[in-house]
């Protein structure tokens, strides 16, 4: 007596074929098997899909073989650098924001510009702390005879230098904007986070107003503070400076208004401002 095998083409794994052979031998039967082309098909629960007609043992074995839980593809959430940028001034002026980990130093430059209200009218450089000659990124000098080479910020990814907290290279760098006024910023990596939403950058927090563009560096900042808070100008141009400053106040920073001009959602994806809680 021989077990009948369906005439239709069946894809079956080598393991299942071995099981059928063992089953036939245990029952004292001769099992006729076809040379099946694929070994990738998983046994299924429906009895009509069993390769042996009316074989309850084969059906039961297929049931036991099923994985307890079907495999699932887990998609990684987007990752972001959490930066805190501080202007080097007598009063602490700082901004904190998230930027996508795939960003470049050019993207970081523009984020700092918008976070502090700079106008992007001058040159800039990112450097190793305390060493003006160790330039990481900036605007390259097109003069072929220039000895001091500046890597193009558009071609340098952030992740090539910010590897993580406590790792080398250092977790913070120096950013200088406007080589005349020399506005120095400390760019510190606070954390690296994953979020279930996609965006380019997002402002989290900050404190105090940044100086006015072209106001003369740290000395000019102190002069502006003196005019606003004390009504005094060391250069005796009080009314002129007041007119130029308008409603500028060194202690005022409105984070919600700043977010409107800073946040950049990814193309075609909404952003949820205020949905992140950062300790």
Image: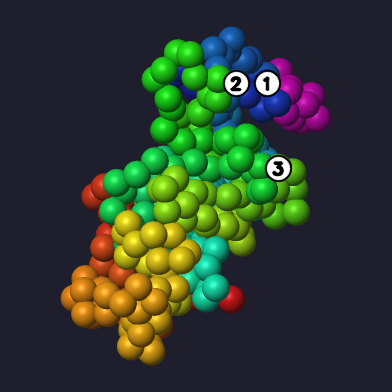
Q: Which residues are magenta?
A: 17-30
Q: CA distance from mark 1 to mark 3?
A: 52 Å
Query: Disc 3 or disc 2, which is closer to the eye?
Result: 3
Q: Position of residue 9 (x, y in %)?
A: 46, 17
> Label 2 neighbourhood size at 10 Å, few (<14), some (14-19), many (20+)?
some
Residue at which label 3 appears:
169
Query: The residue tagged with tag 1: helix, strand or loop?
Result: helix
Q: Earlier in the sequence, mark 1 or mark 3?
A: 1
Q: Nearer the viewer, residue 46 or 216?
A: 216
Does the magenta run of residues contain 18? yes
Q: Position of residue 202 (x, y in %)?
A: 39, 62
Which residue is rendered at x = 62% and y = 15% of the image?
A: 33
Q: Earlier in the sequence, mark 3 or mark 2?
A: 2
Type of secondary structure dominating the magenta stretch? helix
Q: Nearer the viewer, residue 124 or 37?
A: 124
Query: The residue tagged with tag 3: helix, strand or loop?
Result: loop
Q: Earlier in the sequence, mark 1 or mark 2?
A: 1
Residue 50, by quadrant, is: top right
Q: CA distance from mark 3 to mark 2?
A: 50 Å
Query: Which dot marks residue 14?
Result: 1
Residue at which label 2 appears:
39
**Image quadrant for the N terminus?**
top right
């Amino acid at each position: 007596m021989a077990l009948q095998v369906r005439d239709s083409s069946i894809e079956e794994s080598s393991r299942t074929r071995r099981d059928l052979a063992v089953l036939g031998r245990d029952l004292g039967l001769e099992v006729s098997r076809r040379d099946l082309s694929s070994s990738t098909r998983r046994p299924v629960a429906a009895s009509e899909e069993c390769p042996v007609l009316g074989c309850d043992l084969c059906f039961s074995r297929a049931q036991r073989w099923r994985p307890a839980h079907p495999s699932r593809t887990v998609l990684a959430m987007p990752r972001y650098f959490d930066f805190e940028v501080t202007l080097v001034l007598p009063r602490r002026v700082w901004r904190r924001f998230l930027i996508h980990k795939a960003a470049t130093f050019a993207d970081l430059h523009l984020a700092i510009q918008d976070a502090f209200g700079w106008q992007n009218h001058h040159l800039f450089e990112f450097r190793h702390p305390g060493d003006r000659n160790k330039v990481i990124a900036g605007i390259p000098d097109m003069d072929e005879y220039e000895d001091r080479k500046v890597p193009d910020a558009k071609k340098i990814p952030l992740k090539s230098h910010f590897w993580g907290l406590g790792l080398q290279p250092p977790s913070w760098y120096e950013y200088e904007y406007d080589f005349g006024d020399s506005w120095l910023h400390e760019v510190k990596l606070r954390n690296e986070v994953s979020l279930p939403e996609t965006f380019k950058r997002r402002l989290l927090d900050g404190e105090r107003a940044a100086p006015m563009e072209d106001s003369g560096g740290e000395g000019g900042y102190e002069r502006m503070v003196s005019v606003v808070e004390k009504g005094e100008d060391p250069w005796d141009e009080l009314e002129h400076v007041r007119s130029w400053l308008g409603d500028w106040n060194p202690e005022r920073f409105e984070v919600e208004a700043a977010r409107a001009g800073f946040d950049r959602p990814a193309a075609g994806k909404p952003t949820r401002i205020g949905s992140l809680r950062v300790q």
